[in-house]
Image (cartoon, coloured by chain):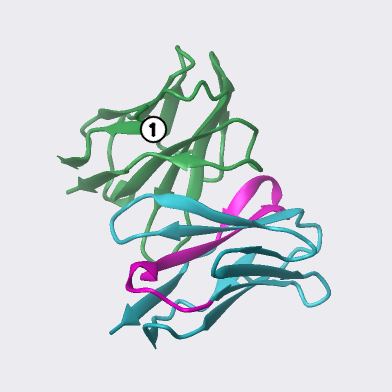
Amino acid sequence: NAGVTQTPKFRVLKTGQSMTLLCAQDMNHEYMYWYRQDPGMGLRLIHYSVGEGTTAKGEVPDGYNVSRLKKQNFLLGLESAAPSQTSVYFCASSSGLFRDEQFFGPGTRLTVL
Amino acid sequence: RKEVEQDPGPFNVPEGATVAFNCTYSNSASQSFFWYRQDCRKEPKLLMSVYSSGNEDGRFTAQLNRASQYISLLIRDSKLSDSATYLCVEFGGGGNKLTFGTGTQLKVEL
């Protein structure tokens, strides 16, 4: 039982490049989330999903897109990376929307040069 | 004013000490509260939920004071392994979402 996994763990991009972060969970959770964590700021919600095939915007969605084609996977895409997107990205899942315990993945450290 | 505010610390305490952190929230409509623990360069993990009547889990006690709009976390008999950043998390005050504090860093020393 791996819980929530994320790939890759680290990535360095140049401005304008694109990439996709993959999140997978094996707990059969309906709800999945993408957060970013920056120094001096709390985790901020980028996008979330309430089930397979559905996504919704969070607090800071600009510059990101997401897809949830399978219940266990939640992908976060950066179409044209900017230095402001340098951050640590965490995926999470939960059995209930928001108010239940959130299980986080180990994070992806992204640097955009 | 930030929705959730925490003293960033660090709180440096000797092993065996009792330490308490507070977290203030700005929206009286907040419904639920949690404490998450985050080790250095790791993901956050739920430490405990905070109930209106207060709750205890071993050496950890969480309290909610709605009149003054703060929650607290008390750690008794601190262990070296308690060294981490403790995140205060609120649900409902800013809509249907979680709001994370920036965290309070605890360092337990020999």
Name which residue lies at 78% across and 77% down. Answer: B68
Q: How many marks?
A: 1
Name which residue lies at 39% across and 42% down. Answer: A90
Q: Position of residue A62 (x, y in %)?
A: 46, 39
Relative to A55, does residue A89 appear above or below in the rendering? Answer: below
What color does chain B have in the rendering? Answer: cyan
Q: Position of residue B78 (x, y in %)?
A: 43, 77
Magenta span covers which residues?
A: B76-100
Q: Main secondary structure of the magenta part?
A: strand
Residue B86 is one of the magenta-drawn residues? yes
Chain letter of mark 1 equals: A
Q: Nearer the viewer, residue A50 or A83?
A: A50
Relative to B54, does residue A86 appear above or below in the rendering? Answer: above
Relative to A70, does residue B46 appear above or below in the rendering? Answer: below
What color does chain A have in the rendering? Answer: green
Q: Position of residue A23 (x, y in %)?
A: 36, 28
Q: Which residue is mark 1?
A: A4
